[in-house]
Image (cartoon, rainbow, N blue to C red):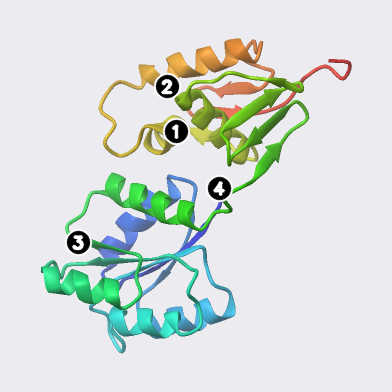
Amino acid sequence: MNERIFVIEDDENIQEIVKLSLESNGYQVTLFDNAIDSLTAINEDAPDLAIFDVMLPQMDGITAVKKIRETNTRMPILILSAKDSELDKIHGLDSGSDDYMTKPFGVLELCARVRTLLRRVQPQSKVIKTATLSIDKSTHTVEFKHEPLELTHKEYQLLLYLIENKERVVERDELLNNIWGYDFIGESRALDVHIRSLRKKLNDDGDKYIKTIRSVGYRFIEKDEVND
């Protein structure tokens, strides 16, 4: 994953909550306490997404969003504000933001909205390949050793997420939040069941493709025999 997110918020407590929530889901977070500094950084090297408060010192978030949209129409922008009237939301969306969320907020819902916004700007057709696997994200089809691999929707999401984050260990909570979503209610045992099923379809003994990192989570590896 490793998408970069700018958070423009002058309340230090909210800054920390948002930062910890996003980082726990694998995002790189940069904090700003005012819009002017964030605009300079966005112009130099725009992130994958920006989250703006409305009531900011020096320049309000709505004005900042409008300035961004003069030159950058692609970067997703989420407004996170205590201003919760219908007119406030309309004003925020009309400024050029892609979504508007009010405070107080749930961190799981925030992460879900971020994922949704980031998906909108991803290429619609993309094939990810490893030594033995090929995943076509446009058709949700998987090939394993050049043969079609039938997966359930959750198995497909798990495999894709692990492969896209294969350079690091993915924590269990991150998988639950990203695969089942913020409204998922249930035990983490569901994750174990799907991991076991996926391993069975990959002929994996637990050390060949999906490695368990004890007390942390999972990591995708590839230890297939050369002559397979």
Circles 2 and 1 in contact, beta carbons < 8 Å: yes
- Determine whether 54 is above or below 187 in the image: below
- Local SS, label 2: helix
- Local SS, label 4: loop
Whole-number angstrom distance, CA of label 3 to CA of label 1: 26 Å
Q: Residues within 10 Å of mark 1 (few under 14, many from 20)?
A: many
Q: Residues within 10 Å of mark 3 (few under 14, many from 20)?
A: some
Residue identifier under label 2: 191
Whole-number angstrom distance, CA of label 4 to CA of label 3: 26 Å
- Residue type highlighted by circle 4: Met
Circles 4 and 2 in contact, beta carbons < 8 Å: no
Q: Earlier in the sequence, mark 4 or mark 2?
A: 4
Q: Earlier in the sequence, mark 2 or mark 3?
A: 3
Does residue 63 appear left or right of residue 168 in this picture?
A: left
Residue identifier under label 4: 1
Residue 182, horizontal then vertical, whole percent: 30, 39
Whole-number angstrom distance, CA of label 2 to CA of label 1: 8 Å
Residue identifier under label 3: 102
- Residue 215 visible to the viewer: no
- Residue type highlighted by circle 2: Leu
- Local SS, label 3: strand
- Residue 152 visible to the viewer: yes
Disc sitting over residue 108 in the figure: none
Residue 167, horizontal then vertical, whole percent: 65, 40
Residue identifier under label 1: 175
- Residue type highlighted by circle 3: Thr
